[in-house]
Image (spheres, rainbow, N blue to C red):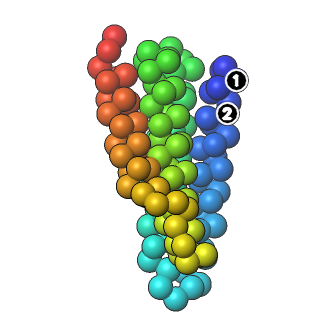
Amino acid sequence: MTGLDRALAALAALAGLLGVAGSAAAAHTSGGETLKTASQFLLFHAPAILALVALAAAGLTRGALTRTAAGALVVGLALFSGDLAMRALAGQPLFPMAAPTGGFVLMAGWLLAAVAALIP
């Protein structure tokens, strides 16, 4: 495993941790639907990032492309879930257009993952 693989795996684990914490917080706050959505995105993508890192580390896919896909998922999560969490907890966005930008980066990450899977 490269240093980048370790960093991506650690960020995936952090996403999982924040997803669980956010889910718990959403369950105990009124109007926690926005925080629930942010938490679900974190929890859904954490295993995907770990899987991409594992595929790249094992040499089963093009390493650079697969790591780029994992990195895009991390950045997209930070923007999308971060914006939703800030709105829910602080009442203001991370910055204008953070959530839509994060959503676009997440979609780009999934597209890169598909391309990485198809290129021998």
- Image quadrant of residue 110? top left
The residue at 40%/36% (across/down) is 109
Q: Against 78, is 7 above or below?
A: above
Point out which mark residue 3 bears.
1
Point out which mark residue 112 bears.
none
Q: Where does residue 57 sit, x and y in percent of width and height?
A: 57, 20
The residue at 52%/88% (across/down) is 30
Q: Secondary structure at mark 1?
A: helix
Q: Where does residue 98 sit, x and y in percent of width and height?
A: 46, 56
Q: Is residue 108 visible?
A: yes
- Image quadrant of residue 82? bottom right
Point out which mark residue 7 bears.
2
Q: Where does residue 95 sit, x and y in percent of width and height?
A: 52, 60
Crowding near the residue tagged with mark 1, few <14, some 14–19, many ≥20 C-alpha atoms within 10 Å: few
Q: Quadrant of the C terminus?
A: top left
The residue at 32%/33% (across/down) is 111
Say if mark 2 contacts mark 1, CB within 8 Å.
yes
Q: Where does residue 118 sit, x and y in percent of width and height?
A: 29, 20
Q: Which of the two residues, 41 or 104, is positioned nearer the viewer here?
A: 104
* Kind of residue at disc 2: Ala
The residue at 45%/31% (across/down) is 69
Distance of label 2 from label 1 (alpha carbons): 6 Å
103 left or right of 8 in image: left
Given the current orientation, which residue lies at the most extreme top position? 120
